Image (cartoon, helix red, strand yellow):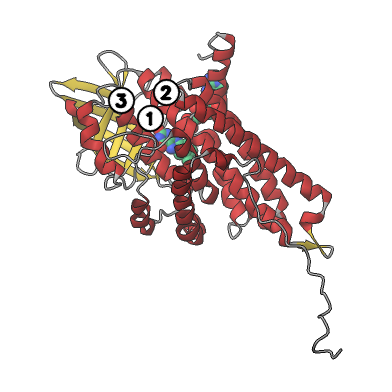
Amino acid sequence: MTTATRPAKEIKQPRPLPPPNSDFYDVYETLNAEELAILKQVRGFMESKVAPIITKYWADDAFPFELLPAFKELNIGGLGMQGYECRGGSLALLGFVMMEMARIDPSIATFFGVHDGLAMGSIYIDGSEEQKQKWLPPMARMEKIGCFGLTEPLVGSGTAGGLTTTAKREGDTWILNGQKKWIGNSTWCDVSIIWARDLADNQVKGFIVENKTTPGFSVEKIQHKIALKVVQNGLITLDNVRVPEENRLQGGNSFKDTARVLKMTRYAVAWMATGCAMGAYEAALQYAQTRLQFGKPIGSFQMVQDLLAKMIQNITASQCLLTRMAQLHVEGKLSDAHAALAKAFATAKSRETVAWARELLGGNGISSDYKVARFFADAEALYSYEGTYQMQNLIIGKAVTGLSAFV
Ligand SMILES: Cc1cc2nc3c(=O)[nH]c(=O)nc-3n(C[C@H](O)[C@H](O)[C@H](O)COP(=O)(O)OP(=O)(O)OC[C@H]3O[C@@H](n4cnc5c(N)ncnc54)[C@H](O)[C@@H]3O)c2cc1C
C-alpha cells in the first residue's frame, strides 16, 4: 500500500464548545411559529444593526438616530395592542421582544418601551376612542415618537401621594406648570404624556402635549448618567403650557388610571431586565471559553463555572416566572402585585447576574470595550426606574398581608 492510498492518520480535533445559549429551559418554544418569526426578525435587527454600533453611542452618550429607518421597518409599533394600526400580537410576544432587545442593548429596549409601552400605552389604556384613533396610528408607524412624564425633581417614589406639577382648567383649556425629571426620549420626541395634579379636585390627570410646537414647554438633557447612556433623558419644564381639553386623557381621572399603565410597563421591564442578564451572561460565557490563564480557558476552572452556573440559574428562574406572568396577563388575571413581583425579582436577579459577569471578566469587566460593562451599568437603571425595588415590595407586601405600608 502506497502512502497515497493509505488512510490518513486520524488527527484528534478538540471537541467544539457549545455556543452561548441563555435559553436553558427552552422558554422560547412556548411561542408559536408566527411569534417566533417576529422574534427572529427583531433578533436579526438587534444583532446586525444595533450590536455593531451601540457601544460607541453608549460611550458618547448619544442616541443612534441612524437606526430609526430600520427600526420603523420592523413594524412592531403597538405590539400587544389591538387595532389603530398597531402590530397586535400576544402579550407574551411583547415580553419576549422586550427581552430580546435588551439581550443586545437595554437602552434600545428602553427607548422602545418608553415610546410603545408608556406613551402609546397611556393613550391605549386611558385615551378616548377619538384620541386613540388620532394618536395611535402615527405612533404605531413610529412617525411620531412619545415620552411619558410622571417623575418630578422632588417627587419620585411618592407620585401616588401627590404631584407638584399642576393643571388648572380655564374653559376648554388646561394650563400646566411644573417640572418632570428623568423623562426618556423627551429631548427629541414629538408627543409627551404629562401627568399633573388637577387643582380643582387634587386628582392626577394625563395630558397629551405636542411638545415641539407648544409654547412654554422646554427640555434640558440630563448629563453625566452612568447607565442607559443611549437613552436621552430630560428635565422638562412646563411654564404655563396650554393644552386643549381634547388632549386630556379622557380615561385618566386619578392615579389609579396612571397605575394601570405602570402595571403594563412593569411587566415589560421585568422581561427587559432578564434580557439584560442574558446579554451579560452570553458575553461572559464566551469570554470564559476563550480567555486563557495558567494555559487553560478560565471556563475550565471550578470557581468560574460556579459563577456561570449561578448566572444561568437566575436567568432561567426569571424566564420561567415571566412566562407564567404572561399567561396570567393573557388570562386577564395579572394584578399590580403580580407585575410588581416580577419587576422586583427579575431586576434584582439581573443586577446580581451582571455583577457576576463583570467579575468573570476581571479587569476587562470595567471597560466599555467589552459588552459586559454596559449591561452591568444599565441593570442599575432598570432596578430603579418604573418604581424602585422597595416600592414593588410595598405593593407585594400590601397584597400578601392585606395591610398597606405606604405612607
Ligand atoms: C434612567 C432612568 C430613566 C427614567 N425614565 C423615566 C421616564 O421616562 N418617565 C418618568 O416619569 N420617570 C422616569 N424615571 C424616574 C424613575 O421612575 C424614578 O427614578 C424612580 O421611580 C425613583 O424615584 P426617585 O429617583 O425620585 O427616588 P426616590 O423616590 O427619592 O427614592 C430614593 C430611595 O428611597 C426609597 N424609598 C422611597 N420611598 C420609600 C418608602 N416609602 N419606603 C421604602 N423606601 C422608600 C426608594 O426605594 C429609593 O431607594 C427614570 C429614571 C431613570 C434613572
Q: Residue 251: x percent and y percent?
A: 28, 21
Q: Earlier in the sequence, mark 1 or mark 3?
A: 3
User: Mark 3 or mark 2: which comes first in sequence?
Assistant: 3
Looking at the image, do the residues carrying marks 2 and 1 touch, with CB atoms under 8 Å apart? yes
Residue under label 2, please give it. Answer: 159
Residue type (three-letter) at the residue carrying disc 2: Thr
Farthest residue to the left: give it: 171
| Residue under pointer 3 | 126
Query: Circles 1 and 3: CB distance less than 8 Å?
Result: no
Residue 290's quadrant in the figure? bottom right
Which structural element holds mark 2? helix
Q: Position of residue 10 (x, y in %)?
A: 82, 75
Circle nearer the viewer, 1 or 3: 3
Q: Nearer the viewer, residue 276 or 85?
A: 85
Q: Amino acid at mark 3?
A: Asp
Tell me: is circle 1 under 8 Å from ligand 1: yes
Q: Residue furthest right?
A: 1
Tally of numbered discs: 3
**Other-residue count near label 2 (Cα within 10 Å), few / some / many at <14 / 14–19 / ≥20:** some
The amino acid type, in three-letter code, at marker 1 is Leu
Q: Quadrant of residue 314?
A: top right
Q: Residue furthest front?
A: 1
Write down the residue under mark 1.
150
